[in-house]
Image (spheres, grey):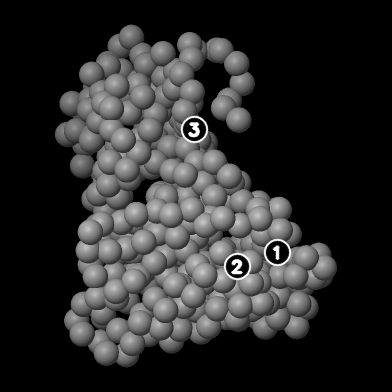
Amino acid sequence: MQIQSKSPCRVDMAGGTLDIWPLYLYHPGAVTVNFAVNRYTSCELRTREDGRVVLRSRDQKAGESFRSLDHLLRTEQYKLPLLAWLVRFFRPGMGLELDTHSEAPAGAGIAGSSSLIITVAHAFNRLLGTGYSTERLREICQNVESQIIRVPTGAQDYYPAMYGGVSAIELTAAGVRRRAIGVDVGEFNSRVVLCYTGEPRNSGINNWEVMKAHINGDKKVHRNFEQISAIAQAMRGALEKADWAEVGRLLREEWAHRKRNVPTISTELIDRLVAATRKAGARGAKVCGAGGGGCVFFLVEPETKKRVEEVIEGEGAQVLPVEVARQGVKVRVSEPGMGPPIQ
């Protein structure tokens, strides 16, 4: 049997880091706003007649093989930990080959790892008939990813991969819930510019440092997150009304508060890009994810989009053509050699 699966990455617009438990419990009304983009992670999962477990990543140009599931379970370090830890969780009772690919550049901050873990988990769920719901798989994926990176993870990154579209992730004491935000996708696409500045120098550290400061009672960080929470709630409303001037203003305000929390979230290149694109017609900009490099999202007027992209490339960054991905994870079951990859 062969399972093919794919899911989109995401751009976070406002309210990031608040989605890490228990931070949102201290900010009533907390919400994270994001949207799925048509840069995908994908996998092919095939059964083997022997008991070997073979893992490969095309984008990382890496692979590893185990004589059996027991051999994998006894191994202490992995070349491809995300894949190995999912095998550890699902514990398939047969040999298998798992090949993956990600269209997210290294350290891009567009939730490539969260998308990939959703992609692979859905493939295993279908292969093994475990019957987990999409929401249950989100919880599992979040827990497994935390086991891998050894720090708490947020909930928001998985929802674009699960459902696609533009989302408000509501964060409450009753749990986490995704609400679709109805926007004119064509209009939104005409205003989106995404660029890649390079792999961050401190990936995975910024959110953890901020979280520790918050939990330790840093009043300045707490106040900043109160502002970020209010901005995210307002961002949701502005998107629902298609008030693009307000969306741009809120983006600028959100970015200013993020930089106050952790100055290392930005770099000299990012600062130059934000300033130069503002002069070229961008309404607002912010770093994706934990920052320190990676991707930057710009909201532009349709008539200034080309000029903003030229300025970005002139500063030495790479424009990544993206649109909103309307659908989330897709899974296809087939016999080996049947048809092209899932579209």
Marks 3 and 1 in Cβ contact (< 8 Å) = no
Q: Is residue 97 above or below residue 204?
A: above
Q: Quadrant of the C terminus?
A: top right
Kindly identify the residue that appears in the image at 42 percent across and 65 percent down: 32
Kindly identify the residue that appears in the image at 61 percent across and 51 percent down: 324
Amino acid carrying label 3: it is Lys
Give x and y (percent) for residue 4: 48, 26
Q: Is residue 59 visible?
A: no
Q: Residue 2 or 237: which is nearer the viewer?
A: 237
Kindly identify the residue that appears in the image at 45 percent across and 60 percent down: 168
Q: Disc 3 or 1, which lies upstream in sequence?
A: 1
Amino acid carrying label 1: it is Arg
Give the secondary structure at mark 2: loop
Q: Residues within 10 Å of mark 3 (few under 14, many from 20)?
A: some
Give x and y (percent) for residue 262: 40, 81
Q: Is residue 186 visible?
A: yes
Q: Residues within 10 Å of mark 1 (few under 14, many from 20)?
A: many
Q: Residue 211 or 188: which is nearer the viewer?
A: 188
Residue 8, disc: none
Q: Which residue is mark 3?
A: 330
- The answer for how far apart the CA atoms under marks 1 and 2 are is 15 Å
Give x and y (percent) for residue 317: 68, 66
Between marks 2 and 3 in the image, the one whose residue lies nearer the viewer: 2
Q: Disc 2 or 3, which lies upstream in sequence?
A: 2
Residue ranking furthest to the bottom: 220
Q: Is residue 66 above or below residue 201?
A: above
Give the secondary structure at mark 1: loop
Kindly identify the residue that appears in the image at 52 percent across and 57 percent down: 181
Residue 241, disc: 2
Q: Which residue is mark 1?
A: 191
